[in-house]
Image: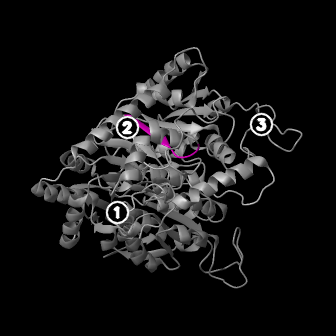
Amino acid sequence: MTTRLTVAQALVRFLAAQYTERDGVRQRLIGATWGIFGHGNVAGLGQALLEHRESMPYHQGRNEQAMVHAAVGYARQSNRLSTHAVTTSIGPGATNLVTGAALATVNHLPVLLLPGDVFATRPADPVLQQLELPCAGDVSVNDTLRPVSRYFDRITRPEALIPSALAAVRVLTDPVDTGAVTLALPQDVQVEAYDWPEEFFADRVWTVRRPGADPAELAEAVRVIREARRPLVVAGGGVHHSRAEDALAEFAAATGIPVASTQAGKGSLPYDHPQDVGGIGHTGTHTAGELARAADLVIGVGTRYTDFTTASGTLFEDPGVRFLNLNIAPFDGHKLAGLPLVADARSGLGELTEALGMHGYRVPEALVAGYTGGKARWEARVDACFAAEDPDAVPTQTQVIGALDALVDASDIIVNAAGSLPGDLHKLWRTRARDQYHLEYGYSCMGYEIPAALGVKLAAPERNVWALVGDGTYLMMPTEIVTAVQEGVAIKMVLIQNHGYASIGGLSESVGAERFGTAYRYPAGDGTLTGPPLPVDLAANAASLGMRVLRARTVFELREALAGARAADTPTCVYVETETSDSVSGAPAAAAWWDVPVAETATRPSAVKARELYERHLPARRRHL
């Protein structure tokens, strides 16, 4: 039997029938579709979404990039088992997807992109917003999405949708290959009717695999762990994607091996777990840094080993250090010339715990005593950063974090991505639940926080969701405040005004660029932006978009405003201007180096001095072979 539908109608109906299943739990793959309509999709997908609105919920976005961020936030909160689709028109609507697609793919988070495309039949050439290349007639602006998509296809015939849609869903549900998936849809093909086989619309369940380890790899992993005297686990985002937190806790408790976390992996253990030693790398804790420098075995679990994690190849100093990489992706399992243990994180950790238990393995008590003392000393430093002796004083950024930390419980979720906040949070935030810490640092995309918080809240409507936003990132993308207001999604926003790009300002100073172009100030007579602060009222802006705004000028007012926001059932912003004499935030200095090249020749003394310091770090870099 067949059903006659347009391509757009068939695609929406197909997507509504796709499910994932893991550990016996089934859920819908595409929970909703975001869309901004234009001539490239309004008559196709726009009409189809209207017709199928009961089976495919629709969210109206304000910015195409932001729609992808919202879908990514939803996907991460859903453990990659459910996501959203995003549709745009051709032209600028489609190219606005590229940044969001890159973020999704870098972070291995599924999102389905459905941009309109130019006419497949070319009745008029060129059409509005068509890119013309004299050397290629089959290229459109959507081809910019190819390098940032894990799967890309252009549907130029109705019947081509069937294999392409199945391939797209395969990638979306594959824990190794997932990321942004793009199906470019020419506007004439979207509205073309076709007789579709009924089987295409039947409910289809995609099992998300939990592969165990190869016996030989497992035996070798057990051997190298048993030989280690100073092992360290580096927990990455794969721990969360696999829901392996309990398995990691059991492994750590059984062996005594300390666990440090990347930005994506933070919360793999709660902050008060005896084996949790905090964040690792350039923005990590000093406790984790000391353990990393002394480690003779690094056990990476679901991590990509980015330069922030490895301190640009300088962190793991022991001459004989080895790497054991438990990862579902062979590409990441072989990094740093490590021994691969290719398996699902939860499955692999369970197998390791069982095998090591048979041998009675546990680290030396001297190592346990050392990191236990280091952990206690670091917690005292966190207390000092959060402390505010004068409740009538203007708060520092770390005191803002501390005030929020004192208010929330394990049900709250914080969302952040860029600026000086990621470093402060990685060092200082006391994560209480496995999914409390939602920090996008694979792409560290300014503007992510507000739309992602919206997506997280849609996935977890019963939770308090906080978007922590600096003034720089707020100005990039406040648009989805309107969507939150429209749909009554009660996200909370902490908007910190520090008059510029504080993180890059600090980095600029460290590399001899003297904070040039990083402050939000009027120009001075010497060509720098060092005049008075701009009279920008971001609180008024948020209010003009429909958000309830609570202004806080002091530590006391901040605490009151945060409590009021947490209790609110409408989108609410807490606006606070932080102490600007504190160059960035008041957090402890970086625990490890980060390689940002410095000018080799310069006339200004600051750059000359920065180059000298840079060259002193270079010899510490190494390739682990």
Find residue 599 and report its horizontal and vertical position in percent.
72, 58
Numbered disc 2: secondary structure: loop
Q: Earlier in the sequence, mark 1 or mark 2?
A: 1
Q: Label 3, label 1: how many angstroms apart (C-alpha)?
A: 47 Å
* Residue type highlighted by circle 3: Arg
- Taking 544 as reference, is 129 above or below it? below
User: Does residue 161 lie above or below 39 as drawn?
Assistant: below
Local crowd size for mark 3, using a 10 Å CA cut-off: few (<14), some (14–19), many (≥20): some
- Check residue 521 in the rendering and tell me which mark sits there, or answer none: 3
The tag on residue 505 is: none
Label 1 amino acid?
Phe
Figure quadrant of the N terminus: bottom left
Mark 3 residue element: loop
Identify the image quadrant of residue 115: bottom right
> Can you tell which quarter of the image residue 336 is in?
bottom left
The first of marks 3 and 2 along the sequence is: 2
Specify whether residue 406 is painted magenta. no
- What residue range appears in magenta? 412-419
Mark nearer the N terminus (3 vs 1): 1
- Which residue is at the front of the view, 138 or 363? 363
Q: How many C-alpha atoms fall within 10 Å of the one at disc 2: few (<14), some, or many (≥20)?
A: many
Q: Which residue is mark 1?
A: 323
Q: Which residue is mark 2?
A: 431
Specify whether residue 25 is in view: yes
CA distance separating discs 3 and 2? 35 Å
So how many labels did they put on this image?
3
Q: Is residue 166 above or below residue 560?
A: below
